[in-house]
Amino acid sequence: MKKRNIKNIIHKFLSNTATFEEIEFLTKWVNNNKASFQEEIKLHHLVTGLFEEKKAERLKRDLLNNFEQFVTRERRSRRFNVLKYAAVFIGVTTVGTFFYWGVFVDKDLPQKQITITLSDGSTKEILETKTSEVISSSGAYVAEQEGSKIIYKKKSAKTYKNLGPLVYNTMEVPYGKKFKIVLSDGTEVYLNSGSSLKYPVVFYNEGPRNVVLRGEAYFTVKSDSLRPFSVDAGLLGTKVLGTEFNISNYADDEYAKVVLVEGSVAVNQGGNPDNQAIVLKPHQMASYSLSSTNLAVSDVDVSSHIAWKDGILLFKNEDFYRITKKLERHYDIEINIKDIEVGQERYTGRFKTETIDEVLQAFQRIKEFEYSSSNNEIEINPKK
């Protein structure tokens, strides 16, 4: 990538308009170009006139220090995916920028509230209300919110084709929340905590139906033999005609997974059409290992993979490390396990209305451990 493009990506990153792919590329580039990145940050803020040179110098040092601390930190002794670096990278930059601007507009928005980014780049906060509300509309569609669901509807039976590039919205759901989207073709997408979905506001009547997922979602795809539905999940690509399935591709998980409930799906590695696709049958799972880069298929009990959409935490012989990741997303907390033996203990359990303390106390009855909590963080240690 040419240098002038790198400068453009940095500018878009600092103004919160960079794409997933640009953030991923920038994160890798910074590892080998820290000095250049420092100077670009300084130049960006000096040119925009946000603050004087002394503060610009301080900001660039803080950004790099925070980035280095995150990359070298070994949380639970697990390897981190580059997208996780990028996610924290954004947070570090945004916090630093707000500090030096002296303003705090929407500082907590990405972490605490469901948001929707419209095609014009504007972002709206989505509050779960009992009344219906129009979120956005145009001559072709209307998006109406009903509680924890947004429905996209075409305004007429007009045939939408050859109208130029599709118009996309992006929904982001933070930890501790879930949300449902009904796309213009009738496909239902239920987003789990810590997930985002990029999707067209209106699908054309001809051509494929494509969306981009980061995190986890349950899809009920509206059948249409002439328009295949595909999901770009980063490490996995999934193509269907009409079916129900679950995709999980959190950046800090060891595996990306597609679990088929009904119908048939074709899964390929990285969404690359040149890679041979694997066709799943109901109650099968395709899993891609980040460490071995292998794509494997196995028969599974789908209930443990889709219970989350009904607000249920269901664990079946899972190790505590994996369980705590799900607990973090569900309760919007951070859990640190300080003992390998405790982390490797396997549990089976079902929870729905329990608090995080009640869940941990239930696990304590199986394997003794101690835990303490402070500022939305929980530390787990072996029993003394």
Image (spheres, rainbow, N blue to C red):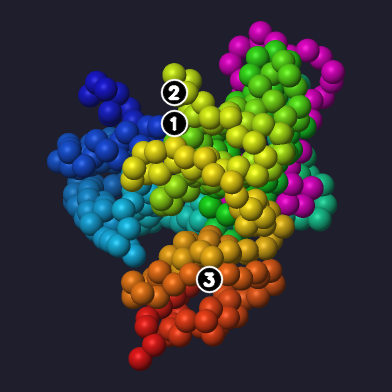
Pointer 1 with pointer 2, Cβ within 8 A: yes
User: Residue type at mark 1?
Assistant: Gly
Q: Magenta stretch?
A: 146-173
Q: Which residue is mark 2?
A: 275
Residue at point 84%, 18% (across, down) = 157
Alpha carbon distance from label 3 to label 1: 32 Å
Alpha carbon distance from label 3 to label 2: 36 Å
Q: Nearer the viewer, residue 241 or 332?
A: 241
Q: Earlier in the sequence, mark 3 or mark 2?
A: 2
Residue at point 19%, 49% (across, down) = 57
The residue carrying pointer 2 sits among few (fewer than 14), some (14 to 19) or many (20 or more) residues within 10 Å by Cα, namely few
Q: Which residue is mark 3?
A: 347
Q: Nearer the viewer, residue 55 or 88?
A: 88
**Horizontal side of residue 206 vs 111, given as left or right:** right
The residue carrying pointer 3 sits among few (fewer than 14), some (14 to 19) or many (20 or more) residues within 10 Å by Cα, namely some
User: Residue type at mark 2?
Assistant: Asn
Of circles 1 and 2, the one toward us is: 2
> In what element is the residue under mark 1?
loop
Indicate the position of residue 176 as horizontal and vertical percent values. Answer: 59, 61
Indicate the position of residue 139 as horizontal and vertical percent values. Answer: 76, 21
Tell me which corner region of the image, top left, top right, bottom left or bottom right, holds residue 279: top right
> In what element is the residue under mark 3?
strand
Alpha carbon distance from label 1 to label 2: 8 Å
Q: Earlier in the sequence, mark 1 or mark 2?
A: 1
Find the residue positioned furthest to the bottom. Answer: 384
Q: Determine if the magenta segment contains residue 161.
A: yes
Find the residue positioned furthest to the front. Answer: 299
Dividing the image into 4 quarters, which one contains the C terminus?
A: bottom left
